[in-house]
Image (cartoon, helix red, strand yellow):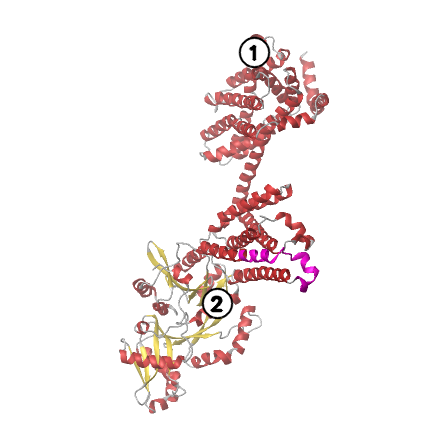
Amino acid sequence: MKKSVNQLVHWMKEHSLLLKLIFLGSVLIFVANQVTHIVQGMTWQDVFQTMGQQSRVRLIGMIAVGLVGVLPMFLYDLVVVNVLEEQGKPKMDRWEWFVSAWVTNTINNLAGFGGVVGATLRANFYGKDASRKKVVATVSKVALFMISGLSILSFIAFIDVFFIRPDSLFREYWVWLLAGSLIAPALFLFTQLKKYTLFKDFFPKGIFLLFGASLGQWLGALFVFLSVGALMQVKVSLISVYPMFVIATLIGMLTMVPGGMGTFDVLMILGLSQLGVSQSTAVVWLIYYRLFYYVLPFITGILLFVHQTGIKINRFFDNLPRIFSQKVAHFILVAALYFAGIMMVLLSTITNLSNVSRLFKFLLPFSFDFLDQTFNMLIGFLLLGLARGISMKVKKAYWPTIGLLIFGIVNTISRTASWQLIVVYLVILSAVFLARKEFYREKFVYSWGALALDGVLFSFLFIIYAVAGYYSSHPHKTGPLPHMFLLFPSDDVWFSGLIGLGISMIGLITLYQYLADTPIRLGESYQKERLDALISKYGGTEGSHLLYLKNYVYYYYQENEQDEVLFAYQIKANKCFILGDPIGNQEKWAQATLAFMDAADLLGYQAAFYRIGEKYTMILHDLGYNFMKVGEEGLVDLSQTETVPTALATNRMELQHLTNLGYTFTMYHEPISEELFQALAKVSEEWLGSRRERNFVSGCFDRSYLSLSDVGIVRNEKHEVVGFITAKPIQLRQQMSYDLLRYSSDVPEYLTDFMLTHFIEEYQKQGYPLVDLGTAPLSNVGETKYSFLEERLVNIFYKYGDQVYGFKDTRKEKERYVSHWQARYYAYSKQSNVLFSFIQLALLVERGKGEGMSIVEEAMIIS
């Protein structure tokens, strides 16, 4: 006998695949046969009619019940996590646990395959920072208990139909109920036998929780099924339904078909039919049950799973996927806003827009249309304004955009709903959501590039509207063709649209002012004490002395509430221009620059650095800046005892005739008198002539500014002041430069050399090792064919603009003194246009003292 049994077992193992196929095939044949009979006994019209009778409130109730019915299964995951944490796994974040439990149970509920999917997902979610072997063992043991709750319900149903209600229609299934009710005791007995080995980590609390979790799972499913029937108001005793639910579920589980689909449904339809429920009503009942207990939670689980997986992928690739998706969504949103705005303005202008081309005929259904010309015009221009704000990533543009889009979408769909339109609008709203973290800037600032593009767009729309008005008012001059496209019913309608255009412009300007308004400021106003302290501690730069003119904004980078680095800038358009290297601790240059760039970017500005040295240029290059050479700075090394004195002696001999004529040079180290200041003012005015004072790169003739530095004055034989030169300290006792060098119109030819020679000698006597003679603009820039394209273009300007600007003369007059030249560079953001940047810099320099600060610049300074 034993031998025969072993042979039978061996034969079954060898042919297990065949037996499984036969079993599944028989199940499918049974299901197909019963489905055929069910379909023949009902009509789909009755099904749809029953579904149409359900109100929205009932459907919402079914959704809520279906989602709540999933929650008891979370006990499985609670047991798994507790066991793993007792085995040494770090404590899991409860929100992360909730998401993992929801994903696992909703997916396993629909596509469980006997708990295999659930075990795999739990091993994936809870296996972090734990032994893989322990995790797999734990979740596999949990899977054993999933049918235990159904076994308990089978026992209750068996008692009910066999003893309490022996007249039940479902008593004939008592064998299935009895067999099912034996599973739980057998499992409990098995756990008792293995409680010191296989289930030692689960006893005693874990075992009871798992039985409770399984019972909760099937009670939840029963609750959802009966609740759906109650909400459908099916006329049947729900207490009579539950035994059939348990029987159908048990048989469905034994088939290993995901969710018992097919067998469960057929058995339930047959059982409900026995209770007097029509087959069409039973089908709808099952559809809603499947939809709200299985499908809807499954979809949410899949979405959460994709989200969680996306987070992991995003972390693995260092946030690049998230950044890429944000950029794509941001581009889609900007394109959609521009499209919507342009189409609405065109609809207000060209009433027969669909006749213009097939392209417009295709695009027109996807645009907003409020059936009011003035309102269309206003909304269109507001969308264009918001599109620019969104493209500039201004935070304040986000919610107005959402409001306007939702308003337009609801208005359009309520009148012309189609699935294509809904899909497009869902894509746009998804882009709004995905791009939400792109918006971080606190204010809107127009760049020249953006202003040029919007200017072209608005001009085009205005011209189209004007042309449309002309054609409408002169029909006898235009012919029939324009009126096919540019048609207004009357001049009054066109004039009404013109008023709408004016209102739109007011609305657009108001929107820009709203986006540009912010209490946040970049930097502070002039504070002499802080500036003095930083220069005294770390030394100055080529442009540090100019900061005492007070027409800069001062951004201090601090660490531990101590000033470390200063960026003083002036604004032109969306650029913050900084002259020379930063003032302060050179070891903090990189982090200070990054902090300044972030602060400027937050307010929509870009930092640009002019006449900076090689060391700082390389730092900016590492921070993503482009750069180009803009000239060379001449330094006189007074420590070179062989060359410098010889050059000065040579110059002195050449200039001796000026001394013979009675010209003298006097250096004033103390503030000059009012009488002498007036004499200098006369020389300065004569030197300027019709020109204005230059800004940013040089000082200006100002009493308070002159009082901060030494002044060298040249007098003629009549003791009249005919020229002066002002000192510009860079580093005390180490490096000196000059700023203003001015003279009267009727002075000898070599007076400039006369002043420079005496100036250098003066600070040589004081022990300064270096004298800085300033920059020779564009000198040695783009001289070879291998230079950057921008530098080659600058070289052309250097050669052919020399007659106007005297670039070569500037270098020539300094060259006789200079010991060596140091390159100076211009560094600009890679996002900016170098041509626009240079034009802005030129306008800033030539603005002069006569032009005050702009409103935007004044708003940047804390008074």
Q: Is residue 317 visible?
A: no
**Nearer-N-terminus badge (2/1):** 1
Q: Which residues are magenta?
A: 475-499
Q: Characterize the local packing of mark 1: few (<14), some (14-19) or many (20 or more) Cα atoms within 10 angstroms.
A: some
By secondary structure, the bulk of the magenta-drawn segment is best described as helix
- Numbered badge on residue 160: 1
Q: Position of residue 325 (x, y in %)?
A: 56, 47
Residue at the location (53% across, 70% down)?
791
Magenta-drawn stretch contains 494: yes
When the figure is inspected, residue 722 is found, relative to residue 694, above or below; the finding is below
- Numbered badge on residue 779: none
Magenta-drawn stretch contains 538: no
- Asked if residue 466 lies left or right of residue 72, the reply is right
Q: Pointer 2: what residue? A: 840
Q: Nearer the viewer, residue 531 or 429?
A: 429
When the figure is inspected, residue 526 is found, relative to residue 19, above or below; the finding is below
Q: Secondary structure at mark 1?
A: helix
- Asked if residue 606 lies left or right of residue 20, the reply is left
Q: Nearer the viewer, residue 106 or 438?
A: 438
Q: Nearer the viewer, residue 466 or 140?
A: 466
When the figure is inspected, residue 648 is found, relative to residue 346, above or below; the finding is below
Q: Position of residue 118 (x, y in %)?
A: 57, 29
Q: Nearer the viewer, residue 306 or 648?
A: 306
